[in-house]
Image: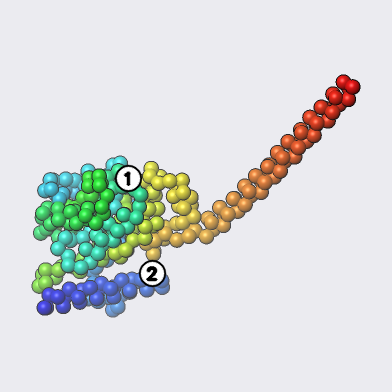
Amino acid sequence: MKKVCHIVGIAALLLAAGTLRAQAVRSNVGPTAATMPAALQNVGFEPPLDGQMPLDLAFRDETGRSVQLREYFGQKPVVLAFVYYGCPMLCNQVQQGVVGTLRMLSFNPGIDYQVVFVSFDPREKPDMAAEKKKTALAHFRRPGTDSGWHFLTGSQESIDAATHAANFRYNFFPKTNLFAHASGVMLLTPQGRISRYFYGVEYPGLDVRLGLVEASAGKIGTPIDHVLLFCYQYDPSAATYSAAILRIIRLGGILTVLCIVAGILISRHRETLAAARNLRQQLSSGVERGAH
């Protein structure tokens, strides 16, 4: 019963922390030690844009194979989230949020991007990671994408290096065997640089799609995606995409000018055709009169 109460308490604290941080973003004033609950004073997730994830870190994948992070980089952008597989609440929601959002996209894991979950609990083993992958694939329901999903476990040293690079901070409570931690997901470039990040456990499909297109440097996506990227820009303070009003106005102005020019050209072309037709008719009439 005490453990259940503690879980609920941590969840409430995390919700409170999220509210405080949201207020801080709106007011441009960060939460202080006086406003942040003691259990969460060292908990956070503020990835540095363009920060480099160390790719030589050693982990084990869900099969128990020894791997380095670089195996998932090099060619495709990467969706990466820090979780722990024994988490009773928040991490499950993060994983469900990632799966649910990626299901909305036409892009495919393993073909267009990679998905990597990294456990920040060094006690967890590949068998737990394998169960989480099995659950994710069952919910994703897209055959042929298994090779794009990766669930890793590793040593404290590797975990510390990875979480430090992403500025992901958490607290461990030995009495309850639970962690207090933030939630979110990152999009990294094929070179391992942090391109975009999104907070919480639900991630807007359009934001993630545009983020993947940007992280890939335009190697995936459609012409429409690139038009949308012109009209939307990423706001790191809110960790979301918002309409770039000046760009939209500029694009609208360009389209208006193009429409006017096109209208003038079409009108002149019609006038030219009409003049040529009249000339032919006049010449034809002249020839007929000459014949008579």
Mark 2 and mark 1: span between their CA atoms? 33 Å
Q: Residues within 10 Å of mark 2 (few under 14, many from 20)?
A: some
Where 136 falls versus 266 (above or below)? below
Q: Position of residue 24 (x, y in %)?
A: 37, 72
Could you tell me which residue is drawn at 24 percent across and 59 percent down? 95
For the view shown, which residue lies furthest in the top direction?
291
Q: Position of residue 125 (x, y in %)?
A: 10, 55
Quadrant (top left, top right, bottom left, bottom right) of the N terminus: bottom left
Q: Earlier in the sequence, mark 2 or mark 1?
A: 2
Horizontal arrangement in the rendering, residue 178 relative to residue 253 (left or right): left
Residue 14 falls in which quadrant of the image?
bottom left
Given residues 17 and 131, the one toward you in this image is 131
Where is mark 1, residue-wise? 112
Which numbered disc covers residue 22?
A: none
Task: From the image, tell me which residue sits under label 2.
Answer: 25
Instruction: Look at the picture and state if 108 lies above or below 276.
Output: below
Of helix, strand and loop, which one carries label 1? loop
Disc 1 marks a residue whose amino acid type is Asp
> Dot 1 surroundings within 10 Å: few (below 14), some, or many (20 or more)?
some
